[in-house]
Amino acid sequence: MILPIYAYGQPVLKQTGEELDFDRFTGLEELISNMWDTMYAAKGVGLAAPQVGLSLKLFVVDTTPYEEEGKPFTGIKKVFINPVKLDEHGEAWSFEEGCLSIPDLRAEVDRPERVNLSYFDETGTVREELFDGLNARVIQHEYDHIQGILFIDLLKPLKKRMLQRRLEAIKKGQVEADYKLRFYRKP
Ligand SMILES: [Zn+2]
């Protein structure tokens, strides 16, 4: 089932996600399946639980669309639950990022080349893995989501100021996307 994606301005995007309790959480399989459906329908390569309105430490990543013939890159398709960033290293590199919660806005973001994570997969098995390149990039972006951090928060103040009007417009719902967005309405 495709879920609406929570847009910039929604308080849940600024919250730190709660740890998922495997023993008590019901409907995990369905939630993950819905998150895949939602991400693919919006042509994304990653989606975090806060983006579907759930303040939880859970995200999904599929970077296989970045695979191109003749290029050495191998994508990943994985579910990350209660991930902990153990280490980030390598030279910082710049890449133009976007976010399904912030449609029509892209900006260059610097991040370290590699990230070492421990996390639980969808079966509840604990894993530790090192990711690099575009895989690390997408994981770092999604990991930030479950800490309440958006990629625009990582921009230099001047750059962020330049985008302020567009961000305000998105907050008010004045933006087009070819997937369903849910905007914040003041109670
Ligand atoms: Zn995002």
Image (spheres, rainbow, N blue to C red):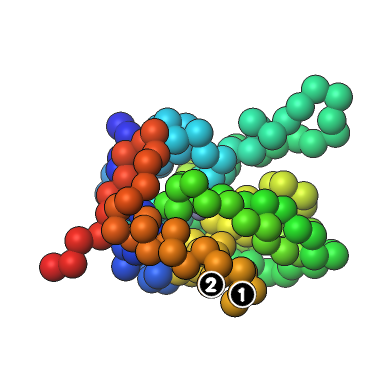
Q: Residue at x 72, y 64 (%)?
A: 110
Q: Determine the residue located farthest toward the top in the rendered image.
A: 69
Label 1, label 2: how far apart the Cα atoms are:
5 Å
Q: Of the numbered discs in the image, which one, if any, rests on residue 158?
A: 1
Which residue is more in the foreground, 166 or 8? 166
Q: Of the numbered discs in the image, which one, if any, rests on residue 118?
A: none
Residue 148 x, y percent position in the rendering: 45, 69
Q: Residue at x 68, y 58 (%)?
A: 108
Please, what is the three-letter code of the amino acid marked with disc 2?
A: Arg
Marks 1/2 in contact by CB < 8 Å: the verdict is: yes
- Asked whether, in this view, residue 70 is left or right of residue 159, the answer is right
Q: Residue at x 32, y 39 (%)?
A: 180
Q: Determine the residue located farthest toward the left in the rendered image.
A: 187
Residue 46 x, y percent position in the rendering: 53, 45
Q: Quadrant of residue 90?
A: bottom right
Q: Label 2's element? A: helix
Please, what is the three-letter code of the amino acid marked with disc 1?
A: Leu
- Asked whether, in this view, residue 72 is left or right of residue 21, the answer is right
Q: Residue at x 74, y 67 (%)?
A: 88
139 relative to 46, above or below: below
34 relative to 153, above or below: above
- Asked whether, in this view, residue 152 is left or right of residue 49, the answer is right
Q: Residues within 10 Å of mark 1 (few under 14, many from 20)?
A: few
Total number of numbered discs in the rendering? 2
Residue 115 in view (yes/no): yes
Residue 55 in view (yes/no): no
Tell me if the residue at label 1 has its CB under 8 Å from ligand 1.
no
Residue 45 x, y percent position in the rendering: 56, 40
- Asked whether, in this view, residue 181 is left or right of residue 156, the answer is left
Quadrant holding the N terminus = top left
Residue identifier under label 2: 161
Q: Label 1's element? A: helix
